[in-house]
């Protein structure tokens, strides 16, 4: 299939926002999405961006049934491992359903990996839902391993009121 992978631009935020909602629907958590296109524009394309993104795009003659040429994306950011040093975290990897199985997801993941290696990163980190067997199988085929099953780490989160209370020393 003919497609290109390129750096996301400010003009891509509308399509990224659309695909974030599609991903959330697939993951059965669409009610959790609170960010807007404007948030993406501010947080990803300011002087000190919180994330970076790449886009998978097909030519006009291969556009989706809904008329989209931007058919996949990945958001990522740099982090630091106290054990291994520089790392890259892939927040999202998404390809529209009708374009899956054509090498787009693998190309997006490869690009994030290339960017991480170029920045001196020694690892790529990400999460995947335990019920998403096709994605788990895909990642394992890419040479990834399951940190939870191998080392027992769980991904934890503090947000909302709990985060406010924690910050105020109230917990």
Image (cartoon, rainbow, N blue to C red):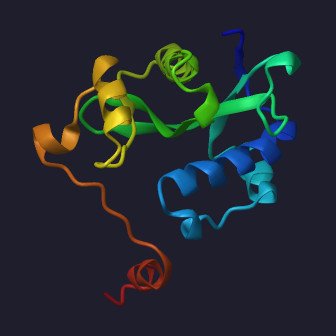
Question: In the rendered view, does 148 fall on the left or right side of 91?
Answer: left
Name the side, left or right, on which 133 lies relative to 30: left
The one of 131 and 35 positioned closer to us in this rendering: 131
Q: Residue furthest front?
A: 65
Residue 47 placement (x, y as % from top left): 77, 43
Residue drawn 28% across and 24% down?
Answer: 140
Q: Is residue 50 above or below residue 146?
A: below
Residue at image x 48%, y 19%? 113
In the image: residue 5, left or right of residue 132 = right
Quadrant containing the C terminus is bottom left
Quadrant in the picture for residue 45: top right
Is residue 17 found left or right of 129 in the rendered image? right
Q: Quadrant of the N terminus?
A: top right
Q: Residue at position x 31%, y 61% from top?
A: 156
Residue 136 or 152: which is nearer the viewer?
136
Residue 86 in view (yes/no): yes
- Residue 17 or 22: which is nearer the viewer? 22
- Coordinates of residue 93 in the picture (x, y in percent): 53, 35
Q: Is residue 45 in view?
A: no
Q: How many marks?
A: 0
Q: Position of residue 106 (x, y in %)?
A: 49, 19
Asked whether 76 or 68 is in front, the reply is: 68
């Amino acid at each position: 299939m003919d497609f290109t992978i390129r750096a996301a631009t400010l003009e891509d935020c509308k399509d990224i926002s659309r695909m974030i909602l599609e991903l959330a629907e697939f993951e059965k958590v669409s009610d959790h999405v609170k960010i807007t296109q404007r948030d993406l524009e501010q947080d990803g394309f300011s002087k000190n961006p919180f994330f970076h993104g790449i886009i998978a795009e097909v030519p006009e003659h291969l556009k989706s049934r809904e008329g989209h040429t931007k058919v996949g994306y990945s958001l990522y950011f740099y982090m630091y491992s106290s054990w291994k040093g520089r790392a890259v975290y892939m927040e999202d990897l998404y390809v529209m359903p009708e374009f899956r199985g054509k090498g787009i997801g693998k190309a997006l993941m490869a690009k994030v990996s290339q960017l991480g290696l170029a920045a001196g990163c020694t690892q790529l980190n990400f999460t995947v839902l335990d019920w998403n067997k096709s994605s788990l199988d895909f990642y394992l085929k890419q040479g990834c391993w399951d940190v939870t099953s191998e080392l027992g780490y769980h991904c934890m989160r503090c947000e909302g009121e709990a985060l406010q209370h924690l910050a105020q020393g109230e917990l």
